[in-house]
Image (cartoon, helix red, strand yellow):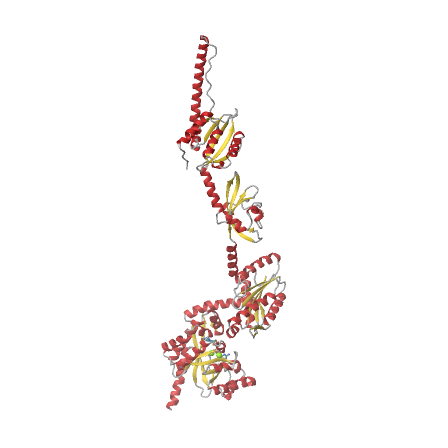
Amino acid sequence: MPTTRPKAKRKVARKRLAGLRPAKAAPKLGRTGLSEISEVVRSRAEADAAIAEARKAHDRLREAIDILPQGIVFLDPDGRYILWNKKYSEIYNTSADLFAQGARLEDTLRIGVERGDYPEAAGREEEWIAERLAKLHQPGEAHEQVLADGRCVRIEERLTKDGGVIGLRVDITDLKHREASFRLLFDSNPVPMILCAQDDERIIGVNDAALAHYGYSKIEFEKLSIRDIQAFESVAPWADDRSLDERNARTWKHIKADGSLIDVAIYSRDLMFEDRPAVLLALMDITERKRAEARLAFVAQHDGLTGLPNRILLRQRLEELLTHTRRSGDKLSVLFIDLDGFKTINDTLGHAIGDKLLNAVARRLRSSLREEDAIARLGSDEFAVVQAGCARPEDAALLARRLLDALGEPYLFEGHTVVSGASIGIALSPGDGDDAERLLKNADMALSRAKSEGRGSFSFFEAEMDARAQNRHRIETDLREAIANRSLQPFYQPLVDLKSGRITGVEALARWLHPQRGMISPGEFIPVAEETGLIGTLGNLMLRRACMDAASWPDPVRVAVNLSTLQFRAGNLLSVVMDALKQSGLPPKRLELEITESLLLEKSDDVLATLHALRALGVRISMDDFGTGYSSLSYLRSFPFDKIKIDQSFVRGLALNRDAQAIVRSIVSLGMGLGVTITAEGVETEDELSCLRGEGCHEGQGFLFSKARPNHEIAQLLTAQHRSSERVDAA
Ligand code: C2E
Ligand code: MG
Ligand code: MG
């Protein structure tokens, strides 16, 4: 705001200035005389003309300087005002009343200082005036002046040839405001910012946020160059030919005052600072974000329980090793490891112990390997190891043996001694595959073989396993189709009462007539159906068909249907059985369900409840293939079976085998004690039959009586038996 001054003060000032002006010289006439007078008149006229001309030139000059946007002033060598333009008067509006031709700048300054027009002079008036005048007489660099109303003027002065001064004035108030707000924006910005000189990369400015974030003092900072705070990069963020976007997308490692490293994203802008090319850097600390990203990446690639790499990372690592071996000609092996009986340990001792076991296994595996080998946890109790630099199959075998020994050692958890062996499948590269996918698949296949050959062993992959796996795959595809188009159906094999020789029941056995391959045995397709989950549909289909067929046979012949363990897991077995009975109209007492010992191995309450519920319906439950599983007598106590079927392996050659006879005898007496029907499976010869009779076995089933037959044949057989019994009864 321009300050207003009382008029009286101005008048005094003007008077003081008038007194300071040089006195106008009085005109002097030389000698008197006409000639002289005319001479004088002529020269006077010439002088007037010259003066008029000079005045014109002066006016033109004034007009010209008046339109300039800057203030301009001409001073004579004594520092007196000669000429100034409008802008000059406007800039110094509070002092404009003092400007007059011939007035001395020094005097106007002094009056201005007294009146308070120059706040910078307050308290050091004489000194300030002296400095100001010194600048006037040795003009050079531009300098700035603050006026009473807060405006800021930039002053540039030059000496003229005659020793006078031309002064330029620019009102830089706006510029100063902008500078001040920029400073404020910079200083108080919450984002750490650093200003660097472009040429020598020195740090020439830092804001408070940068001081706080990096921990250097302002003085320390300004002794450093941007490269001094970079951990690894030897070029400044702007010193490459990347585009701005590329530069901004990069991250850098910076060193804080305490020596710690941080990750920063840098956003940079080129600008001029105090006439120097500079770069303004805004620094975003992304250390936490990077850490979180790294954590996420770790989680995505590792197993949460053991911290081992997971399948994804293993595959990646294997690909890398394979790329390396392709170049070097080295070999490697992939070992798939599966714990034996893990599920039982988990079920019986609880998940906490199960988890402890898995962690202990991970530790034992890791400590049995070399640095360059890779290890991963693939699934619940499945682990994999990639053995680098495995020159011969024997090396892989040695490692497998070592791992099996390490894992076979007992574990002690919470007072429980846990013993858990493992099985290992091995695939070698090259040979069993030179890509990760194939090697992993083949090692897995070798593992299946190892498991089937007995626990605690290892097995190498063989090409023939692959053929078998492909066959499995074909079976799976065809089986789906067979179930859908009903080319799968039950055949029935009679069960004969050994005393009366009558057929008391038949067992439904799945038969699949393949369009190309002919009859396929259930031994081949039932395991595939179990592996692929098709067993549910297949089992339900068999149950419905068997009940339908049996309902049309003469009473009281029963039908026995085999159930897979997996059908119990589905959870809806009871309703499936009830539906089949309801739809067919078959009385429950004519349905027999055959289960195997493996079902009871699970010791599941759900399974027992389902069995009890089925039995409560009136359905009979048989224990199939007795003697082949874990054969624990406790199974017989856990559920009241209606029938025990002695596996055919005990019946074969029974007449000549005393051990088998002893076993059959004890099973029969056990059955008698429990009031359970004993059926012998796979009876093929008369000798076997008479032996079984001799032991008191109740029922027999086998080729000696009949193989499994299609429904129409069995129906005929049963009808014939029924008629003959009617005839006997009638007789
Ligand atoms: P399993 O339940 O023990 O059935 C008896 C098996 O012994 C049948 O084999 C039968 O054909 C065979 N067999 C009968 N008598 C003799 C004989 O005198 N000598 C010989 N060597 N074998 C005889 P199959 O039909 O091949 O069935 C094999 C197994 O497949 C069955 O054993 C059963 O566990 C399973 N299975 C068959 N059909 C089904 C089904 O519908 N569902 C389920 N879950 N499993 C089924
Ligand atoms: Mg059976
Ligand atoms: Mg059987």
Rendering coords of residue 626 (x, y %): 50, 80
Q: Position of residue 497 (x, y in %)?
A: 45, 86
| Nearest to the observer: residue 282 or residue 426 | 282
Classify 622 as above or below 480: below
Q: Identify the residue shown where x is 49% and y is 28%.
A: 166
Q: Percent position (x, y) of residue 436? A: 55, 61
Residue 681, can we see it? Answer: no
Residue at the image position 52 percent from the left and 78 percent from the top: 630
Is 664 left or right of 725, judged from the image as shown?
A: right
Viewer-side residue, 273 vs 709: 273
User: Does residue 137 sit above or below 389 in this rendering?
Assistant: above
Screen quadrant of the C terminus: bottom left
Quarter of the figure with residue 171: top left
User: Residue 313 falls in which quadrant of the image?
Assistant: bottom right
x, y percent for residue 551: 38, 79
Give left or right: position of 436 versus 70. Answer: right
For the N terminus, give its image quadrant: top left
Q: Is residue 526 visible?
A: yes
Give the vertical position of 245 relative to 538 (above or below): above
Q: Residue furthest bottom?
A: 731
Q: How many marks?
A: 0
Give the residue furthest to the top. 34
